[in-house]
Amino acid sequence: MPNLDETDLKIMRATQAGLPLTARPYHAVAEQLELSAVEVIERMRRLQEFSVIRRIGAVPNHYKLGYRFNGMTVWNVPEEKIDALGQKIGRLDFVSHCYHRPRHLPLWPYNLFAMVHGKSQEAVDRQIEQIAEILGDDNLGSEVLYSTRILKKTGFRSR
């Protein structure tokens, strides 16, 4: 782990709520902190290499994009097939994230999770049917947990 100096901490504080929504976000951060864009980029890259920053990625607001129906589909699939099945499901363009989670038997037999988004209930139902078709006989049971409110996605917060 690198030694974090005050500049690293300033960059982390300036970006912890997200990068500015501009064509050149690193330049905007640099200007705000009176640094060069090159220094901001290099420091953020170093922080990422040492896992101080785990990842930098877009977090779309599906509601603002018109996707009002959001369901976390949960599937019980054979453990020995979960990697291959998860990769197939994760590649679907309507699945925003897909991952393996442990079962909690006897109450929770599901081990494959896939979040789907649609502009209508019917669209989401069709997506769920597509996933079920891909899983075929490996679908040993499923449920859908629909979103009822928007939760703010945040990461690490420094003081």
Image (spheres, rainbow, N blue to C red):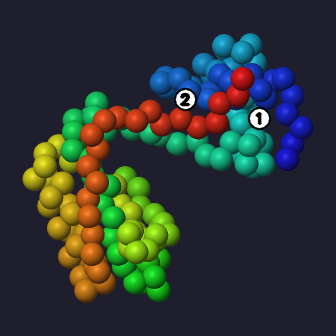
User: Which amino acid type is shown beneath numbered disc 1?
Assistant: Arg
Q: Is residue 143 above or below residue 39?
A: below
Check disc 1: other Cα within 10 Å, few if <14, some if 14-19, many if 20+.
some
**Which percent across, then down, holds residue 60?**
39, 38
Q: Quadrant of the C terminus?
A: top right
Residue 18 tag number: 2
Residue pictured at 15% horizontal, 58% vertical: 125
- Camera-side residue: 148 or 122? 148
Relative to the observer, which residue lies in front, 47 or 24?
47
Residue 76 versus residue 95 in the image, above or below: below
SS for tag 2? loop
Residue 94 in picture, x, y percent from top left: 28, 55
Mark carried by residue 43: 1
Q: Is residue 120 left or right of residue 89?
A: left
Q: Which is nearer the eye, 55 or 109?
A: 109
From where the camera sits, is residue 91 visible?
Answer: no
* Amino acid of disc 2: Gly
The relative height of residue 67 versus residue 36 in the rendered view (above or below) is below
Question: In this rendering, does residue 16 appear at all?
Answer: yes
Task: Report the residue at 35% width, 75% height from top.
Answer: 76
Q: Earlier in the sequence, mark 1 or mark 2?
A: 2
Select label 1 or label 2 by which is in front: 2
Residue 120 position by quadrant: top left
Numbered disc 1: secondary structure: helix
Return the residue found at the far right.
3
- Residue in the picture at 41% in, 56% down: 97
